[in-house]
Amino acid sequence: MTGSAVALRPLRRWIRSTQASHRERGATLSNVYIAVLCVAIGAAVFKVQLTAIFWPAAPSLSGVAALSVSVICAALLYLALRRLGPITLSRPAAYFLLTAPVSRRRLLLPSVRLGAAGAALTGAAAAFAVLGHAGSRDALPTLLVAAGAVLGLLIFLLAASSAAFDHLASLALAIGLAELVAEAAGWTPPALGGPPAAASLVALTGALTAVVVAGFTLLVRGLARTRNDRILESAKTAGTLFDAAFGMEPSWVTDMLERRYWANRRLRSTRPPARLPVLTGQDLLLAGRRRPRLLWLLGATTLPLLLTSAPHWLLAIVLLAGMMVAAQTSTATIRTDAGNPVLARLLGLTSRQVIHQRFWVPLALAGIWGTLALALLQLTGNLPDGPWWTLGLALAPAGAAAAVRHARVGFVRNDLLALDTPMGTVSTGPLVNSVAGPDLLILGLPAVLALAGNDPLPWSSVLLQAGISLLGARAYLNVTTAEDRTELTAR
């Protein structure tokens, strides 16, 4: 910055004092007290669940599985930091202070401190959980947790430096999940040696600490050269996440992700298949242009193998949810049509014709995903005898109908009456919005009962499930649409 730069600290002090003058006395202290109290109450209420997550009574991870979980946690932390910035500003600061004559290094330094602290705490928590599940509880827990915190800081530095490791993090995540799935399928991993010696661990942690200190020195020196577009993009992301959480409106996050995905792609005009209905062909083209998501969905068909030791009713619910997620790959167009049905009006299509044409691609995606997932479960010996793979085809209409209903739900309705409970007032709008779509998964109840019973599957159960799914999906499509209107109202 030049010599005419304005000091940032007095400016921020003036902004905070101006904001405080518009608040009630003690409002900030009250917010901090409520936040700390909620965390303390949540920790006390969910003590058993938190203990099972971080320090279970019977550790079950092998050495190789512990390494895989560590790699998965590191990859997820890196990808999350990349999506959030990690060097960012609040939207007011980005709008008013980013172009002001202030030191950019001092402007961005608080976000670096906050992000580094969050990464360190996340790394320490992940190391503590892996240590608890791996069974090496007497092997230098303090040093291992400290090493996890240092690794979290190192991941923060990598995420803040460049995007060169994005594909490597995705590959590491896929490899870690593949190892866990292989163990769940029956593969016996090689036995690893005992925990590292204390001297080696101390030396490694010290070396990583030196690297982190040097990296942070270079990062802070280069903060002034951070590009405006990168800061603004991260500010929009953080602001949208905060608005969605505060207003309980998840559609804002979905819309942001859709816009960002298509904004970063080079598209060329392609004619839809002539033998298909026009909207079905459009959905097919859009689904084909989302190859990364299709590849992840294909790999996700193996994830139910991780739940083979869980109750089978939970496995059935996860299968239904997975089919709904797979069907949602192409339902962004339904969300657009529900908000502004201009395309349907130009084509002269009624709401019933639009939904019928939009229904085929989600139906195919849900059926393929469910069939592959159930076939893998049966091939690995986790299901009894019977045509379980056909159950995926029978459940496809239910998963597709749930995805279509969720896409048509629209914004949260805040005009609905609130519920008074002993714990306070609960807004019913977000609750109604969250269950719209998953409620149609009740059509898969016969499949849930069949999986929960863990008995051989007869063809009569498959036919029963297929009939209920088809009739339920058909009834939903016909009841919520009409031949005399175009609008896809949320029903």
Image (cartoon, grey):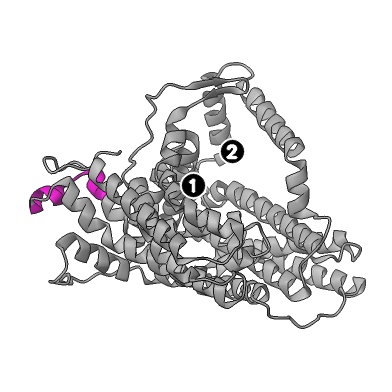
Can residue 4 be spotted in the picture? no
With 145 as the anchor, is 319 left or right in this view? Answer: left
Q: Quadrant of the C terminus?
A: top left
Query: Alpha-carbon neighbours of circle 1 within 10 Å: few (<14), some, or many (≥20)?
Result: many
Viewer-nearest residue: 347 or 248 = 347
- Compared to residue 376, the image places residue 457 above or below, namely above
Give the x, y percent position of residue 363.
33, 61
Amino acid carrying mark 2 in the image:
Arg
Give the x, y percent position of residue 427.
48, 27
Give the main secondary structure of the magenta stretch: helix
Which residues, given as a range, are shown in magenta? 336-347
- Compared to residue 204, the image places residue 91 above or below, namely above
Q: Earlier in the sequence, mark 2 or mark 1?
A: 2
Q: Residue at x 16, y 52 (%)?
A: 353
Q: For mark 2, give the secondary structure.
A: helix
Q: For mark 1, give the secondary structure.
A: helix
Foreground label between 2 and 1: 1
Can residue 355 be spotted in the picture? yes
Q: Residue at x 71, y 65 (%)?
A: 151
| Residue 238 numbered tag | 1
Q: Residue at x 60, y 57 (%)?
A: 453
Residues at circles 2 and 1 in contact by the CB criterion of under 8 Å: no
Viewer-nearest residue: 220 or 147 = 147
Residue annotated with mark 2: 9
Magenta span has 285? no
